[in-house]
Amino acid sequence: MWEYVGDYVAIALAGVAAVLVLGLIGLLALAPLRVHLSLRPIVFGLSAALMVGIGALSFWSRWALLLYAVALPVIALGLWDIFQKKHAALRNFPVLGHFRYLLEMIRPEIRQYFIESDTEEKPFSREKRSLVYQRAKGDMDTLPFGTKENVYEGGYEWITHSIAAVEPPEEEPRVLVGNDQCSQPYSASLFNISAMSYGSLSKTAVLALSRAAKMGGFFHNTGEGGVSPYHLEGGGDLVWQIGTGYFGCRTPDGRFCPDQFRDQAAHPAVKMIELKLSQGAKPGHGGILPAAKVTKEIAAIRGIPMGQNILSPPAHTAFDTPIGLLEFIDQLRRLSGGKPVGFKLCVGHRSEFLSVVKAMLETEIMPDFIAVDGAEGGTGAAPHEFSSSVGMPLNMGLLLAQNGLTGAGLRGSARLIAAGRVVTGFHIVSKIALGADLCNSARGMMFAIGCIQALKCNTNHCPVGVATQNPGLYKALDPTDKAHRAANYHRATVQSVLGLLGAAGMSSPDEIAPSHICRSVTPSSVKSYAELYDFVEEGSLLEEPYPPSLDEIWRRSSPFQFPFSRSRSAS
Ligand SMILES: Cc1cc2nc3c(=O)[nH]c(=O)nc-3n(C[C@H](O)[C@H](O)[C@H](O)COP(=O)(O)O)c2cc1C
Ligand code: SF4
């Protein structure tokens, strides 16, 4: 009997192959006809033929019955597809229709692996991701054979090097954050981990980032979800972010609780406090943590119920005017024992930002830092329109912050932090040229700990355990190994900044000026940032005539009220 087994296996395989081939021929044949024909009758016919055919074969040999094991599930699937009512595509194209869903499911991976070019940014090019991976692994990060960029294409940017280049500085320059209203200034790295909550990230990811921050001497922003045990376990310096949900310092009805804030802010790991007004990927939307990612522990850390999406309201309840915002910052600084306090925003109405600057002049309360996030920034989950059509891109937002503070003569009292697709040394240098003192990265750090840009952060199905609360997935992320990677990535990126400084003949980031960064505007013209962007003079907003680029908006700004709440004119 055994000598026939091979034959029967061959018959079985032939059967399966026949079904697939028939299906494929059907698909190919129907495609040109733009699929005007339902496959239902074919499926009925094919099913009947298979049942009868296999039955007939079994008279010849009972091994043929094995073919039912293949045929019956396919037939059952076909019948299920025909009689279900949810998907018209499956009713018309039973069985075969699933290929469409399958292909749709793996479309991003197919694009990423086979179609996308190295320099196409969606949202990060393969080239940029590979650079982060190489730096994170400590692999060689040099490029063979020259750049892949089209250097004549509009938008191509570079730093102007010097004939009198110098050796790069050996030490990473640190940036002291904290003005004279703060009694515990913090010495920050040029490059840090941007806000990402435990909840949008897994516990192993948060732990890896916290350990990396400790190893590399840079800060780790908690995100608005509050300080979790994993932020503390790694021992890195923390920036505690407080959003509109006041997680970690909230009353049962969701308002700010000064007592809880004082206790948490006193933790020695908390080096600075960031009040989140908005973020680039979803400005004005507040936060969403999908219910699927809300574990018991996350609910407890945040002080909210389980089983529902966690929503942070779109605006703060602790203040509603520019002066109110600064008074709140002052309150937070006092409650924290004098730690640096700042705010993060993606610029919306320019007059609102300038109203806050006017409130600084009015109250003489200065934030220790302002973090400007660009519309190009990332998120765990956001509605499409908010991600793609709300908020100012980073360069313009940063320029407004730089000009607002400089024009008001206040630039020396607050540090500017920039975030939004900052992943390389050149990105950092170019943001410094626009006014930033230091930069943050969210997705760069995610790549360093293993993110493959599978774009499933909002589903709880992150395949590499970075952005999921599913233990089956996040346990695969080894926090010790990934901590080394994030620390390596940080170190190599900062070193690349130092290398660029040396090539430009500079020994400190303070020397970087707008004229040092150039951009191809057309294939035959080049402009530096100094020519492209309108920088205002120190103190120029303090008396008339105001700089033309800000004149109308500055006049409309008010420290007592956010202008847009009473005017609908263009901002
Ligand atoms: C997974 C994820 C979670 C985030 N969570 C927060 C958050 O809790 N608070 C916040 O202010 N920004 C949050 N952001 C935005 C980042 O902090 C940062 O501003 C933005 O992503 C900058 O862009 P980058 O990812 O290109 O560095 C998050 C971003 C990502 C990717
Ligand atoms: S791998 Fe995909 S799902 Fe996971 S964090 Fe990266 S983009 Fe999000």
Image (cartoon, rainbow, N blue to C red):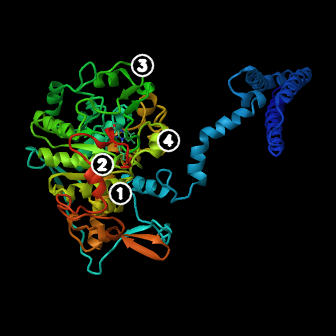
Residue 487: % across, % down:
30, 49
Judge from the rendering whether residue 29 lies leftward or rightward of residue 264; answer left or right. Answer: right
Residue found at x 37% / y 43%? 568
Tag 2: residue type? Ser
* Residue annotated with mark 2: 351
**Residue 190 visible in image:** no
Q: Secondary structure at mark 4?
A: loop
Mark 4 near ligand 2 (CB under 8 Å)? Answer: yes
Tag 4: residue type? Leu
Quarter of the image for the N terminus: give it.
top right
Q: Quadrant of ligand 1?
A: top left
The first of marks 2 and 4 along the sequence is 2
* Residue annotated with mark 3: 307
Judge from the rendering whether residue 273 lies leftward or rightward of residue 84; answer left or right. Answer: left
The first of marks 2 and 1 along the sequence is 2
* Residue annotated with mark 4: 455
Residue at mark 3 to residue at mark 1: CA–CA distance: 39 Å
* Residue annotated with mark 1: 395
Q: Quadrant of residue 493?
A: bottom left
Q: Nearer the viewer, mark 2 or mark 4?
A: 2
Residue at mark 2 to residue at mark 3: CA–CA distance: 40 Å
**Residue 63 visible in image:** yes
Residue at mark 4 to residue at mark 1: CA–CA distance: 25 Å
The first of marks 4 and 3 along the sequence is 3
Relative to 36, say whether 62 is above or below.
above
